[in-house]
Amino acid sequence: MIAVMQPSATAEEVEHVVEVLRLHNLKAQISQGEERTVIGVIGTGFPDDLLETLEVLPGVDRVTRITRPYKLASRDFRPANTVVEAGGQRIGGTEFVVMAGPCSVESREQLVRTARGVAGSGASFLRGGAFKPRTSPYAFQGLGIDGLNLLEEGRRLTGLPIITEVMEPAQVERVAETADVLQIGARNMQNFPLLKEIGRSPKPCMLKRGLSATIEEWLMAAEYIMHHGNPNVVLCERGIRTFETATRNTLDLSAIPLVKRLSHLPVIADPSHGTGHRYLVQPMALAAAAAGADGLIVEVHPEPDSALSDGPQSLTLEGFDQLMQTLERVLAAIGRPLAMPHARLRAASV
Ligand code: PEP
Ligand code: MN
């Protein structure tokens, strides 16, 4: 249930609604919009006449039941878009962000070359996995802490903030020391202990859609993080498993405008995992931008053919540069500027 206050409601009237909820053993989650305050009612066992009770309180405009199971993540609760601030960047604002880098951090040379290359082409974040969730226990598992240190070096050299995956609750604090954004991988979308731990962290996070997750399950996973105290959640559509085997996954482009309708959280598209093929990355990246995504996460490798993970879907540095040039034209057509052009200037001077 949410109570929407009148534009003229005073702080005392808002506090009074909160107090009434407290008397019913319910919690209030306050969302301060530009014009109005919206109070979300959190708890179980609402009295039957709660709606009527709240509706007549001074300053209350209307009270509505939220029938969806997610509340904090819902646009009913927060009509305005959430803008997540991370590493000096804004995700979900007018500016379009591009996160780029290797699937896995492999070596200093590989990471530094990639970081400089993607910064020079206009990326706004450096991505790279240090802790890797691999299907096979025999596959490269990532450099771990050494990988985090290399990412820090990449940030120092280019000024790009870092996004990297964290797989276990016990690692959250350590990874958060380095990362500007914590990535929750598709395989961990419903790792509830991990979601709760990230919920207790103030660090922004990006929640990838699970391999076979419905949109509701995905938003419920976001709700877990927000319910535990972290409102800085970015969603990432990275393709889902369907009957189709010609692509690695089916990038669900319709999920982008749909989730933006259901939720106020920013949505990023991952055309690399979403397709699995380098030649499909650019067309899907452009389509995702046109469909209203707030940004992209793209795998880039200086020598994809020798990559230790996800080489076939990784763009070369030249391929990424070409994508960025075309992307700017699509963004111009939909009236969205690319984030942080100064990264380019910075990269040019290193
Ligand atoms: C990745 O970003 O490299 C990754 C493992 O992605 P996902 O969790 O979407 O498979
Ligand atoms: Mn990958």
Image (cartoon, grey):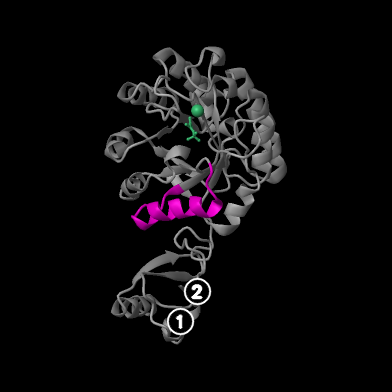
Q: Residue furthest right?
A: 333
Q: Position of residue 9 (x, y in %)?
A: 44, 78
Q: Quadrant of residue 162?
A: top left
- Judging depth in this view, the residue of 49 and 233 nearest the camera is 49
Residue 282 visible (yes or no): yes
Residue 185 visible (yes or no): no
Of the residues shown, which amino acid type is indicated by label 1? Leu
Mark 1 residue's CB less than 8 Å from ligand 1? no
How many numbered marks does the figure carry? 2
Q: Position of residue 300 (x, y in %)?
A: 54, 23
Location of residue 315 with respect to 230 vertically, above or below: above
Describe residue 284's horizontal placement relative to residue 223 as left or right. right
Q: Is residue 243 magenta?
A: no
Q: Position of residue 148 (x, y in %)?
A: 35, 26
Residue tagged 2 = 65
Describe residue 302's horizontal placement relative to residue 43 as left or right. right
Contact (Cβ within 8 Å) of mark 1 with mark 2? yes
Mark 2, other Cα within 10 Å: few <14 / some 14–19 / many ≥20: few
Location of residue 228 with respect to 333 vertically, above or below: below
Q: Which numbered disc, 1 or 2, marks the residue that appears first in the sequence?
A: 1
Of the residues shown, which amino acid type is indicated by label 2? Arg
Query: In percent of the image, x 60 and y 24: which residue is there?
Result: 320
- Judging depth in this view, the residue of 175 and 195 nearest the camera is 195
Q: Residue furthest front?
A: 243
**Disc 2 secondary structure class:** loop
Residue tagged 1 = 51
- Judging depth in this view, the residue of 318 and 335 nearest the camera is 318
Q: Is residue 215 magenta?
A: yes
Write down the region rendered in magenta: 212-233
Describe residue 338's horizontal placement relative to residue 191 as left or right. right
Query: In percent of the image, x 32 and y 37: which residue is there?
Result: 168
